[in-house]
Amino acid sequence: MTTDALRAPVHAELPVAIIGAGPAGLSAARALKRLGIRYVQFERHSDVGGIWDIDNPGSPMYRSAHFISSRDKSGFFDYPMPKDFADYPSREQVLRYTRSFTDDFGLREAIRFGTAVSSVEQDEDGAWTVLTSTGATRARAVICCSGVTWDARTPGIPGDFAGRTMHSVEYVDPSLFRGQRVLVVGLGNSGADIACDAAANADAAFISTRRGYHFVPKHVFGMPSDETEWLPIWAERLVYGIVRRVMVGDVSRWGLHRPDHRLFESHPLLNTQLLHYLQHGDVTAKPDIARFDGDKVVFADGSRERIDLVLFATGYDMTIPYVPADYFAWKGGRPQMYLNAFSRQRHNLFGLGYLEVNSSAYTLFDRISHLMAQYLNDQVHRPDRAGKFERLIREDRPDLSGGIKFVGSDRHAAYIEVRAYKKYLRTLSKRLGWAELSPGLFNTVRAASTRKASAHANG
């Protein structure tokens, strides 16, 4: 493939291939369906939902999981979550909502369930061959929507441990902790949730962290805390700085590290329940692990604890195993894509969901897939405008940080600030003459699905 791979011929007679039927894949399907773009969707599991289906093999979901963002900020565009859902919906509610979205927009008919994708290759003519467990499919474009929480990252710890170790991807039910002395390593939002499960069920519970985190209450003035997104970032920092000082205070009192970064330069923790358990001695904070020593864990401060189970809540590596590595510019374990979505190396290779964001992702998925669909549509009907966007894919490098200096780690390399990202997408749409997302945009898709379902029921 030459360096002109970004400007390959358009194979309009072929479908677009969507890989994955979790929230990102379903967003892409709805966007393509609205514009009448033919597509086929591959899902290795037996139903939609991605990680939110606890029965999906490899899902990191656990029984006590809830959405980190609130109900009214967490839905697909123009498809709000039901008002009778909790402020922070449970995993069961999120899965039920995702499946209702699938059915209401008639997205099931194009999904090939039980079909795993093993490889994706771009052919010499610019088209794509998608090899699956049921055969090969030729496609004009590929949208990778297979998610970022499947490949667990576990640190190497010196020494030998006599107890059990596991990663949070294996964790499902708090009954695992009964009768155990448990150490949870890592304190992202999942780690904090699991530490709370351990505090309530284990004989003794400990958390080990390398750095400090900002704790943000889930509710401020009776409202979910992410409903302040309309504020500029400086004002949001000011509000939460005051709220944290009044409601949380100095977390080092309970053995936690003080944060070494400003608020929003990394994900804050929306889990004041953990502070409750720390305050009551049901969980004990420890520093980083120095080494294992039989049935003991030795920490960086020289202290040691007898531990039965070590659970690593240490995150995941972003991988797209079915795509050759050189099709994306990988750096620090993250694919470096235009707008975190468009491959700069290959024509019509996209990734949806490969970003870290400080707000709900579902509407962002819709905004990105809306751009993808318009671009694919322009390749057939407005090739001049598609060419302008291809030049942007090659050359445009916008700052999507919103002025936030994110923590300098591989994990944070793909971070974006939601307000800056949305603003740039709006600017881009106006620049190219593309329609912006607006209420009612998908009504025709939903109406067509309703008519088809009614005709099927009456037939």
Image: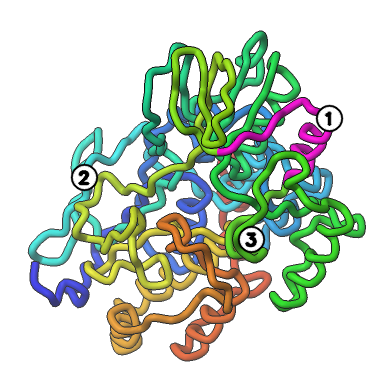
Residue that badge 3 annotates? 359
Q: What is the spatial separation of the Cα atoms under label 3 and label 2, in whole angstroms?
A: 32 Å
The mark nearer the N terminus, 1 or 3, is 1
* Residue found 62% across the figure and 21% down from its top: 173
Q: Which residue is at 74% across, 60% downward?
A: 226
| Secondary structure beneath label 3 | loop
Which colour style is shown? Answer: rainbow
Above or below for 227 versus 156: below
Quadrant containing the C terminus in the rendered view: top right
**In front of the other: 206 or 73:** 206
What residue is disc 2 on?
A: 119
The verdict on residue 399 being magenta is no
Disc number at residue 218? none
Instruction: Please report whichever mark, 2 or 1, sits nearer to the chain's N-terminal start.
Output: 2
- Using the image, determine if residue 34 lies above or below residue 150: below
Q: Would residue 191 be found to the left or right of residue 64 on screen? A: left
Question: Amino acid type of disc 1?
Answer: His
Residue flagged by tag 2: what amino acid is it? Ser
Q: Nearer the viewer, mark 2 or mark 1?
A: 1
**Residue 189 % position (x, y):** 63, 44
Left or right: 233 as drawn, with respect to 8:
right
Q: Which residue of the protein is positioned furthest toward the right in this rendering?
A: 221
Q: Which residues are magenta?
A: 271-287
Q: In the rendering, at what x and y percent does residue 253 appear?
A: 78, 43
Cα gap from disc 2 to disc 1, whole angstroms: 51 Å
Q: Which numbered disc covers residue 280?
A: 1
Q: Relative to residue 153, is residue 198 depicted above or below? A: above
Q: Is residue 313 visible?
A: no
Disc 3 residue type? Ser
- Compare residues 361 and 12 and report the one nearer the observer: 361
